[in-house]
Image: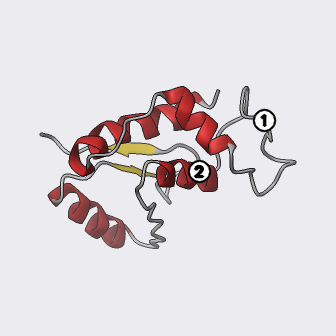
Amino acid sequence: MAACATSALWSCFQGTGMLFQHKIPPPVEITKWAGDHLPENLLAASSRTFPNSGLTATQMAHAVRCVGLEPLVIGANSRYAVNSVMYAYLRGKVPRYWRSPWKSRGMLLDTPLR
């Protein structure tokens, strides 16, 4: 199972579920939803749902849509742009899942303090 991406999405759904009143799915359901959408590059990513080598951004976006939310991808080429977007989400108390453009690997889960 793509535990890292699935866990981060599940953590985000904990916050968005309370904020937007949607169902909070268990991690296995998140991975199944993501697996409904085949990766763009089948040679680089696994076409299997279980086990798999990780979720692509498109698969994660599909899982977000399955709970009734709309994913938003923002390309930013400066820290100022990233900080501006992150500040807006912090002020709105909306959990975010984002990948830093300055790091080669890894995603960050950022949740506002309650």
Q: Which mark is residue 104?
A: 2
Q: Residue furthest left?
A: 114
List x then y, in percent, for residue 54: 66, 37
* Residue 99 visible, this angle: no
In which quadrant is the C terminus drawn? top left
Which amino acid lies under the numbered mark 1 shown in the image of this protein?
Arg
List x then y, in percent, for residue 84: 27, 69
Q: CA distance from mark 1 to mark 2?
A: 25 Å
Residue at the image position 25 percent from the left and 53 percent from the top: 94
**Occupied quadrant, residue 8:** top left
* Front in this rendered view, residue 88 or 61: 61
* Front in this rendered view, residue 100 or 63: 63
Which amino acid lies under the numbered mark 2 shown in the image of this protein?
Ser
Looking at the image, residue 65 sits to the left or right of residue 86; the answer is right
* Residue 49 visible, this angle: yes
Closer to the camera: disc 1 or disc 2? Answer: 1
In which quadrant is the N terminus drawn? top right
Residue denoted by label 1? 48
Per the image, label 1 sits on a secondary structure element best described as: loop
Q: Is residue 89 above or below residue 31?
A: below
Q: Which mark is residue 33?
A: none
* Front in this rendered view, residue 70 or 99: 70
Q: Earlier in the sequence, mark 1 or mark 2?
A: 1
Looking at the image, residue 108 sits to the left or right of residue 6; the answer is left
Is there CB contact under 8 Å for labels 1 and 2? no
